Amino acid sequence: MTELALPTPAMRLFDEIDLAPAPQSTILQRSLNTWREQRADQVLPSATSLQSSVASTLTPHVFIFSPTPEGHDFCLQWVGEDAVGIFECKRSDVELSEFGNRRLAVYARQLFDLATTRQEAVCGRFTLHHKGKISTAYELLAAPVSKGEETNWLF
């Protein structure tokens, strides 16, 4: 029997981590289905084939990140127009550590680390509590894709 040890104590911040993803969001369900179709019998689908196969209705909601050369952070390579406000970034080529929504970036990094370990798609659900008792619920999907020797991440 194999046990999965979560990679960091920060994983306890999540309300739920789905290692056999079944996203609640329709957009994430469709993104995961597209990822699985493109993966077929490969270890990971290619970033190019996945990007070209993402339906126009999904494109505005998708992010693609890649690890930095040092391996300590992830850099935004491409972002859909509706997804820009989620991380509070205005352009691509920005590292997670530079995002305006740093707390959300921490969660994304944890999902990337878990997906790296598993080489599988992972879904995480969590709530961020803001000042003034306003809470925002999030559901993120980290799905690894191959781009040559690199592993990138699709949301």
Image (tube, rainbow, N blue to C red):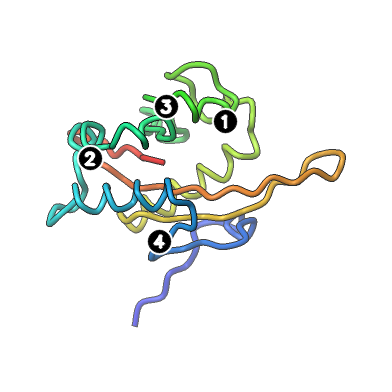
* In the image, residue 64 above or below residue 121: above
Q: Hey, which quadrant is residue 118 in on the image?
A: bottom left
Sequence-first tag of 1 and 4? 4
The residue nearer to you, when weighing 41 against 6, is 41
The residue nearer to you, when weighing 129 against 53, is 53
Label 4 Cα neighbours within 10 Å, binned few <14 / some 14-19 / many ≥20: some
Which quarter shows the C terminus? top left
Amino acid type at circle 1 is Phe
Q: Residue furthest front?
A: 57
* In the image, residue 138 above or below residue 14: above
Q: Between marks 4 and 3, how big is the CA–CA gap?
A: 22 Å
Element carrying mark 2: strand
User: Pointer 3: what residue?
Assistant: 80
Element carrying mark 3: loop
Amino acid type at circle 3 is Gly
Residue visible at 87% across and 40% down in the picture? 132
Residue visible at 41% across and 33% down in the picture? 63
Q: Between marks 3 and 1, how big is the CA–CA gap?
A: 12 Å
Sequence-first tag of 3 and 2? 3
Q: Residue furthest top?
A: 91
Element carrying mark 1: helix
Q: Residue furthest left?
A: 41
User: Pointer 4: what residue?
Assistant: 21
Q: Which mark is residue 87?
A: 1
Q: Between marks 2 and 1, how big is the CA–CA gap?
A: 23 Å
Amino acid type at circle 2 is Ser
